[in-house]
Image: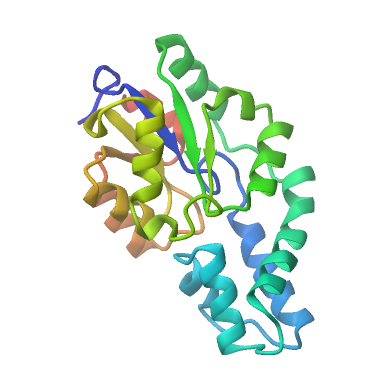
Amino acid sequence: MIQFSDIHAVIFDLDGTLIDSMQIWHEIDIAFFRENGLELPQGISEQVAKMSIDEWSEFFVANYVPTLTPAQVTARIEEMASEHYRCTIPIKPHVTAFLDELERRGIPCGICTATYRSSADAVLTRLGLLDRMQFVLTDEDYPEGKTNPGIYYAAQERLGADIRHTLVIEDALHCIETAVKAGFPVAAVYDPSISAADWERAESLADLSGNDLGEILRKL
């Protein structure tokens, strides 16, 4: 099992890992479909979870409302998410303690997220986390999303650590799969949005796992 002595840098996910926001995105999906005269198709939130922002916008236009443009969809979803990120989404348990330990050990960290940059910056600033990160990389920087390891490689290079000493902390199975295949050590953090089957698979792939960052911290 990986230990702190093996870690020279950390890459965090944002939604579902540092902040408790996954239910908000399901609610946004429902509201966005309804304002376009549609009911949310069963399973659609899970289907689009692996998509980047651009892919989701193109998917919605191609399959549901061809009168809109992908740019209009992207802008509207960003608008709907903005207030939640600026005002209400809470930090997840033990995040501050985990960051305190990284700081104590001199381990740098950054964020890779599929969230809009405006939303990410807003919530991180409100929660006092932005200044504790070396950087925040988003889908706007890497439109292929987290099914491609490019965003992780870019983060690792910025942090100046070898891949095998750069810990990736994620909650979503497809992100864990990408990071593992790319050669990173991975910690899987549970979020209620993940299915039992996906969590079982995530635990089997990751180097360590826990119900929250406090448990990950104790295991390290």
At a point 31% along the width and 31% down the height, the residue shown is 166
From this view, report whether residue 22 is shown above or below residue 27.
above
Q: Is residue 122 left or right of residue 177?
A: right
Give the x, y percent position of residue 142.
Answer: 47, 53
Q: Position of residue 77 (x, y in %)?
A: 70, 65
139 vs 105, nearest the viewer: 139
Q: As displayed, is residue 55 above or below residue 159?
A: below
Q: Is residue 128 above or below residue 153?
A: above
Q: Residue at x 48, y 32 (%)?
A: 110
- At 40% across and 11% down in the image, what residue appears? 105
Residue 40 is situated, as x and y percent measured from the top left of the image, at 63, 81
x and y, in percent, of residue 148 in the image = 35, 57
Q: Quadrant of the N terminus?
A: top left
Q: Is any part of residue 14 visible from this angle?
A: yes
Residue under the point 63% across and 47% down: 117
Q: Quadrant of residue 187?
A: top left
Q: Is residue 71 above or below residue 62?
A: above
